[in-house]
Amino acid sequence: MELSAEEIERYRRHILLPEIGGAGQQRLKNARVLVIGAGGLGAPVLQYLAAAGVGTLGIIDDDIVSLSNLQRQVIHDTGTVGAAKTESARASIARLNPGVRVLDYEERFSLRWGTSHLPLFDLLIDGSDNFDTRYAAADAAEEARIPLVTGAVGRFDGSLTVLMPYAASSTGTANPTYRDLFPEKPPEGLIPSCAETGIIGALTGVIGTLMAMEAIKILTGIGEPLVGRLLLYDALAARFDTIRYKRRPAESAAE
């Protein structure tokens, strides 16, 4: 699928980058990305991937827009309160870039759903707010052998990483899985939700934008994705830290 004259003008600032160029922009145009959640993290992810020219964006979310969402979920607006988040996000993307095809699924992501639908996509991005979905997303992406960009936020802190456990690192060792980073789900109620503790709205923009950047790197084949690295952001201290993690030995993983 070649770029049209209008697309060349729209994405000129990308095409000028030698690392991306016309070939990289075509890869973005041909890419199919599924985003779990059109909320705080999903909003900037969807906006920046749509603006970047990702050809097909899938959105899966079973929630509706509420007034309290608008402090951070910037893909929605006051006029869409009460509407399905997938519907609101689709309309916003159409205004931003009508060349992007949107596939919306008004339901909750599950391992079973992912098993049947992920073969249609090249990349999965998890912007969910619960551990059940995060583990299901990790398992489904590993089964489908596609990269997963996953992020999380809480109050003033955020994190993100990239998972490709089906592949090996440059040294020949297997890449880590989500369970190498988080072996078990925390007990129910141990980690309170943002509805209980609050969250600074701009934080979701920082982490969501970083997730979009990782996706663009993966889709265009540039840079070094955050595989085996967990990026941590402390908003109050304005500090980024990176933690490296590896695949656990088989005997440890089985314990």
Image (cartoon, rainbow, N blue to C red):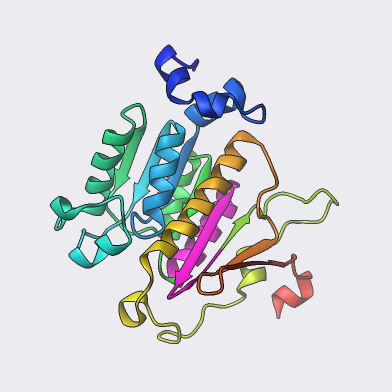
In the rendering, at what x and y percent does residue 26 appear? 53, 24
Where does the magenta region start and end?
132-159
- Give the position of the C terminus as an image quadrant: bottom right
Locate residue 14 relative to residue 61 in the image: left or right. Answer: right
In the rendering, at what x and y percent does residue 158 appear? 51, 68
Residue depicted at x 35% and y 26%: 99
Q: Is residue 133 above or below residue 43?
A: below
Residue depicted at x 55% and y 54%: 149
In the rendering, at what x and y percent does residue 137 appear? 49, 59
Q: Residue 44 in magenta?
A: no
Locate residue 135 relative to residue 74 in the image: left or right. Answer: right
Report the residue that reaches farthest toward the right: 171
Most foreground residue, 109 or 113: 109
Most foreground residue, 190 or 68: 68
Report the residue that reaches farthest toward the top: 5
Residue depicted at x 43% and y 30%: 55
Locate residue 68 relative to residue 204 in the image: left or right. Answer: left
Q: Is residue 144 above or below residue 20?
A: below
Q: Residue 145 in magenta?
A: yes
Locate residue 50 relative to residue 64 in the image: left or right. Answer: right
Q: How many callouts does the rendering have? A: 0
In the rendering, at what x and y percent does residue 50 appear? 40, 37
Residue depicted at x 50% and y 47%: 212
